[in-house]
Image (spheres, rainbow, N blue to C red):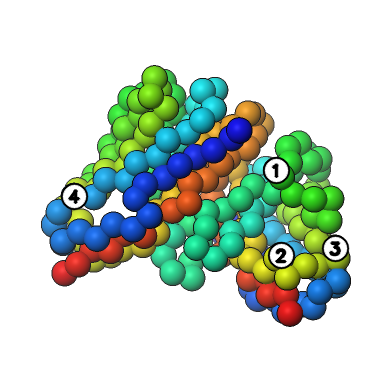
Amino acid sequence: DAGVTQSPTHLIKTRGQQVTLRCSPKSGHDTVSWYQQALGQGPQFIFQYYEEEERQRGNFPDRFSGHQFPNYSSELNVNALLLGDSALYLCASSSGALNGQPQHFGDGTRLSIL
Amino acid sequence: GENVEQHPSTLSVQEGDSAVIKCTYSDSASNYFPWYKQELGKRPQLIIDIRSNVGEKKDQRIAVTLNKTAKHFSLHITETQPEDSAVYFCAASVGTYKYIFGTGTRLKVLA
């Protein structure tokens, strides 16, 4: 049973560029949440996707956008990259429409902005 | 605003002793409280969770307690082992779909 998989594992970009990160949820899960984890900090909620729609968003600018596909996989896009976007980006999947469902995380994508 | 405070930020215990990590949340409507363990360079792993209709939950050496009135919840690890060394995060549900995480506790179990 495959868990949550993310790609790529590492990425180096320069300021102003755009990046796309990918996530495949755990088998049986239909909900994908994205988090940003800065060094030494807890994960910060970016947004959550369910039924191919963004249904809640955290305090992140519009430069952060996403998509969910019919097979429940998801992408996180970040435009006009800033140095402060350097972080570990985590994807978490869960099952069901409501909160209170256990979330399972992937290994993350470490994004470095030069 | 939405906030989860976690203490202490670092905790060192002798092997075999107990460790306690405490979190306080701000949203009185929060109803789900998971705990995650994150080893260096690895994904956060769910180790235990509790819902607001339960005051305590145990799983072998790990337990979580919840005080809804005070908006506190705590992680208790008994008989600590070196492999328990990691960063532990608490989280609380906010609204219907969102989770807020604490800032983490680095636990060191000294052999």
- Three-letter code for the amino acid on which mark 4 is drawn: Ser
Q: Position of residue B40 (x, y in %)?
A: 44, 69
Name which residue type carries label 1.
Gly
Q: Which residue is mark 2?
A: A85
Q: Chain of mark 1?
A: A
Do circles 3 and 2 both sit on a common chain?
yes
Question: Which amino acid is tagged 3?
Answer: Asn
Q: Secondary structure at mark 4?
A: loop
Give the quarter of the image for residue A64. bottom right
- Circle 3 sits on which residue? A79
**Marks 2 and 4 on same chain:** no
Give the crowd class for mark 2: few <14, some 14-19, many >=20 residues within 10 Å.
some
Type of amino acid under label 2: Asp
Mark 2 → mark 4, Cα distance in angstroms: 38 Å
Label 3 crowding class (10 Å Cα cut-off): few <14, some 14-19, many 20+?
some
Q: Which mark is residue A58?
A: 1
Q: Chain of mark 3?
A: A
Q: CA distance from mark 1 to mark 2?
A: 15 Å
Label 3: which secondary element: loop
CA gap, disc 3 and disc 4: 46 Å
Q: Between marks 3 and 2, how big is the CA–CA gap? A: 10 Å
The residue labelled by disc 4 is B18
In this rendering, is residue A42 above or below B29? below
Q: How far is the residue under mark 1 from the one under mark 4? A: 35 Å
Q: For this rendering, which residue is in front, B39 or B69? A: B69
